Amino acid sequence: MYCKTIISTLLGVMVLPVMAEDNTPFYNDSITYELNPVVVTATGMHQRLKNSTLPVEVITGHEIEAAGINGLQEALTMMVPSLSFSPNAMGSYLRFNGLTNSHVLMLVNGRKMIGDISGNVDLSQIDINTIKRIEVLSGAASTLYGSDAVGGVINIITSEPTDRSEFSSNSRYTTKNRFDQGLDLSLSSGKVGSFTGYNYSHSDGWQNSPYTMEDDEMIRTLAQLSLGYTSNNLTQRFTYKPTDRLSTYAEGTYYNKCLDRPVVREDITGGSKYNNFYESWSWAGGATYRLGDLGNIKFDYTGRTYGQWYKYLVESGDYLPGQYQRTKRQKYHEAELRGFFNFSETSNTIFGIDYRHQTLIRPESDLDKGLGTFSVYGQHEQRLWNHITATAGLRYDKVHSLGSRVTPKVSLMFKAGDFNLRGTYAMGYRTPGIDEMYYHMLHQMGSRYTITLGNPGLKSETSNYGAINAEWRTARFSASVTGYVNFVKNMVTSSTKKWSALDDAEKDELMKEFPEIANVKTSSLGIKRYYNFNKANVKGVEINLSGVPCHGLQLSGNYSLAFGRGMNDDGEWQKLNRSVVHSATVTANYFRTWGRYNLNVNLNGRMQSRTYYPGDVDGNAPGYGVWNLMTRHEFDYFRSFTLTPGIGVENIFDRRDMRPLNSNFALYSPGRSVVISLNVTLK
């Protein structure tokens, strides 16, 4: 009875299509509930989620599809409360469990993802239609993954060729002329497989407020809260299995994105002389050789490049309209050899050798520097007794010009039926970014100018992470509570002062180094400097609940509390920049079948408290709550294809931040928006 009440409430917010009653059972036996999926990020080995000695959050491609989500950033925002963004079309400043995006390692199929826009993660590089699942690992994980895995790891697992040929088209239109078109083709022929994915995405820009503050006066502006853009993603992956023991793959991706800024005008502020253009290429290949029951050996190579340009809208200096000026280029290469061994029925062992090299080129700063890292690591997992499993690992990294680092990890799991109790200690580290050490430039973003001053004397960060997790997981219900602490030493951070806050000596020195300041409106000029906190810490709690109270209905609720502080050189504690203390997500998904018609209704929401900007003259960003509703209607009446139209509403309660455009924002939504989608799958 209670289940019918829940379903009636969920369906009460929508109008069901008219249909004839039949005798089809209430549930469909083909429905699966992925409360215990296979994961790989926690320990580097494929294992069931409930058997992992480290807790992992998983977002499946099915959940993303059911929610009608059209981007990786939206998927993470609406489904993982411990993640928060300060988003716009210029990139997304990510925070995870109180720490910044530079402390979170983004992986694609286990390989590092590069490409940032002014320090913000460019998540547009990932085609949402190719995502098979997203695995989110909290806490330090440098033993397996090296530098940057201080706050956690986000591993995006993408689609591979299937054992049958299939083509699908995914179209989605949302208010503000936001349109996405995805095309996927999977082919299979004997030992050879191919997967091709293409995604086109476009959005107009928007203003929630047409005003900005300048010299304590509110004036009209052309600047937009979220910039318009057009992007293209192309993915190609081949697999070849010449023998039962050997399997190989080769893949490549191409991505570009061009922003659509308002053109500069003399009568109003906020226009631009150029658009930003971004482009990335990646290529990878590898092979796995199976050693029978003993395990397997795997080799992977990955190369990536990411570039940024100005595309001029009007004549500026030596550049004419339509011409490009390169502003930044990042390059990354990685080769890794790993062995996975089952020396006994109760153990798993990993050994690995890894080499990485990254390069940053920034013409504005006369910067062209590279950084190489050589690593050796090992990890052993052992079932000690019937109810206890232990994992221990150690990694050695030698970083060119920055010294060496040893990072250990140990975890223990007590398992009794459906109940798990886990304890973890891990060390993390992060080398300062090339940009943080060597930037020395003046650049413009929108109507603002910033002088960025790198610090070659920055120290590497280290962290000590500890967590206790209690979990109860069955086929239809899971509950998990995690308490953690993360102590970070020498955290790299930055502060920005307005030009007016500098003394005369500082101004004179900067005027000598940057004579172009004379052509800049100093009221919109900030000076950004990098430095090390003496120490910082984050203490938090995560609660995750998910269940299937009856056939067809899945409910989940997640809550995150992360309290982060840092101590500066004066011995004063302050909240970490852009930190969010409280956040929560809620999802209700209902599925029902009538003959060859399938209905899916998805309601999801995110709530979060204010975002802190300590010491920032523009103040904190207020908290918000946003709810989305999506319905999908699958018609399987046709012999050769399936149609799945969808209709829904984003931001049901029309939440918007209407403050002037130079404020700090957490919510960039244009308000209530209608969503229309169509999926066509050829069988």
Image (spheres, helix red, strand yellow):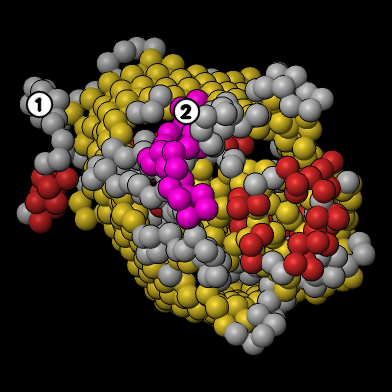
The secondary structure type at the circle numbered 1 is loop
- Residue occupying the far right of the picture: 401
Question: Which of the 4 image quadrants contains residue 64?
Answer: top left
- Residue 28 position within the rendered picture, expressed as x and y whole percent measured from the top left: 25, 37
Q: Amino acid at mark 1?
A: Asp
Q: Work out whether 534 lies above or below 289.
A: below
Mark 2 = which residue?
203
- Residue 112 position within the rendered picture, expressed as x and y whole percent measured from the top left: 71, 49
The secondary structure type at the circle numbered 2 is strand
Q: Is residue 244 magenta?
A: no
- Residue occupying the far top of the picture: 639
Q: Work out whether 61 lies above or below 16.
A: below
Front position in the image: 499 or 169: 499
Q: Residue at x 75, y 19 (%)?
A: 320
Q: Amino acid at mark 2?
A: Ser
* Residue 482 in sight from this viewpoint: no
Q: Residue at x 34, y 12 (%)?
A: 639
Question: Which of the 4 image quadrants contains residue 389?
Answer: bottom right
- Report the Cα–Cα distance between label 2 and label 1: 43 Å
- Residue occupying the far bottom of the picture: 571
Mark 1 = which residue?
22
Q: Which residues are magenta?
A: 202-223
- Residue 312 position within the rendered picture, expressed as x and y whole percent measured from the top left: 69, 25
- Sequence-wise, the earlier of marks 2 and 1 is 1
Q: Work out whether 96 lies above or below 535.
A: above
